[in-house]
Image (cartoon, coloured by chain):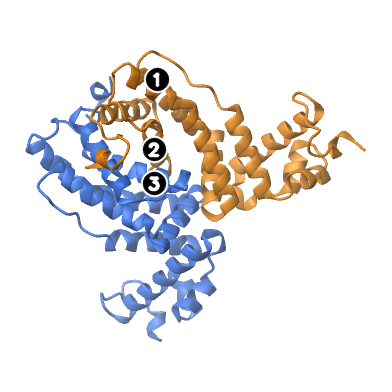
Chain colours: A blue, B orange
Amino acid sequence: MGIEDAGPGTVRPGGRTARVRASVLRAAGDALAEHGFAHLDLVDVARRAEVGKTTVYRRWGTVTGLVADLLLEMAEESLPRTETGSLLGDLKANARLVQRTLADPRQGALFKAVLAAATGEEKTAEALHRFYDTRVKEWAPCVQQAVDRGEIPQGTDAHEVIRAVSAPLYYRLLTSADRLDEAAADRAAEAAVAAARAGAYLRGDDGHA
Amino acid sequence: MGIEDAGPGTVRPGGRTARVRASVLRAAGDALAEHGFAHLDLVDVARRAEVGKTTVYRRWGTVTGLVADLLLEMAEESLPRTETGSLLGDLKANARLVQRTLADPRQGALFKAVLAAATGEEKTAEALHRFYDTRVKEWAPCVQQAVDRGEIPQGTDAHEVIRAVSAPLYYRLLTSADRLDEAAADRAAEAAVAAARAGAYLRGDDGHA
């Protein structure tokens, strides 16, 4: 049995199976960025990755399974949060990371492709939601730290603040031809901080009166 | 020549040609909401609309042309803004309109379908951008009125404020399984007002220092 036929449970980080996964997911990302989900094809991905198509079919099964694993890897590989000592500094770092990712031609096209795929595929939507949950949880502690420093009110919903930073950048990407620049990133962070200070993200009904 | 063969320039509002357009666009919206852009088919749309397929091909040509016309009609038909006398009241009215639209099963699925289509089709993206431009321009005057009343600073970018209200609702729709409820709409409006008051949406580089 060749290495490419290794089943689940045989993955060693840095081993051949991990390298096969990295190659296939890289190829899947390239194909998605170039042609979108509708044209994603396991045989094409195998060819791009220089991996046997049997391996790809055995390990990922379907294009949906492949995209779900790609989103899992994107969450695993996403950068840890930056700590700057202030909420505005932390959220600007987060906003600029999102902005650079979405403004990058390959990454921007890849995110558009998986967002589009998730609108029509429940399994892809679930994998996409897990990706964003992971990202939000990675950055949420900076909001609690700001509460502890007295920058923003007790009871602020940290997840809502982190989502508020990304939302205008994704909205701009999907609904306009406007360039996603650093000014847009900084404005997203500034708006989230101002709204958090004013209590717009307090948990519970009392916060939304 | 039958009414269905009427060419461009013959449209009378309320006339048969207008009714054919309304039927075909309604059918196109239903098909998009049910099956997404990838499965949109002019013959199926003609059958659903009970209109000859020749008419549909002559008038709209391609699925892309049909979706562009649907987005044009959605902009034409979208509700005028509400005036409540305060920026928070106006933006809550706007946010609840967006929230109700996206939370509606047919409309939510339709918006997801056109957003997804726009990620892969330049003509659809342009039509989508025009739709959002129209919506933003419809609501922007309420921000200038708030400037005139002294609620928010001179130099506030009205379009950015209106976009800030929609952004978290679209972000929630596309990246999470969380329900789009009125609390989410109100929070989006409250956050936009707080950020606008704090000067986060001032035009020009000075506003983003």
Residue type at mark 3?
A: Tyr
Amino acid type of the residue tagged 2 in the rendering: Ala
Secondary structure type for disc 3: helix
Question: In this orientation, does residue A161 appear?
Answer: no
In 3D space, how far apart are the residues under numbered discs 2 and 3 (Cα atoms)? 8 Å
Dots 1 and 3 on the same chain? no
Disc 1 residue type (three-letter): Asp
User: Residue at position x 27%, y 55% from top?
Assistant: A97
Distance from disc 2 to disc 1, alpha carbons, whole Å, reads: 16 Å
Q: Relative to the observer, which residue lies in front, B73 or A147?
A: B73
Q: Is residue A184 left or right of residue A84?
A: right
As helix, strand or loop, the secondary structure at mark 2 comes to helix
Q: Position of residue A6 (x, y in %)?
A: 37, 79
Residue A75 is labelled as none
Q: Chain of mark 3?
A: A
* First of labels 2, 1 by sequence position: 1
Closer-to-camera residue (A91/A71): A91
Q: CA distance from mark 1 to mark 3?
A: 24 Å
Q: Which residue carries the number 3 mark? A: A170
Residue under circle 2? B167
Location of residue B176 by image quarter = top left
Tell me residue B126's x, y (percent).
56, 47
Specify the label residue B90 is tagged with.
Answer: 1
Q: For the point 63% across and 44% down, which residue is it? A: B67
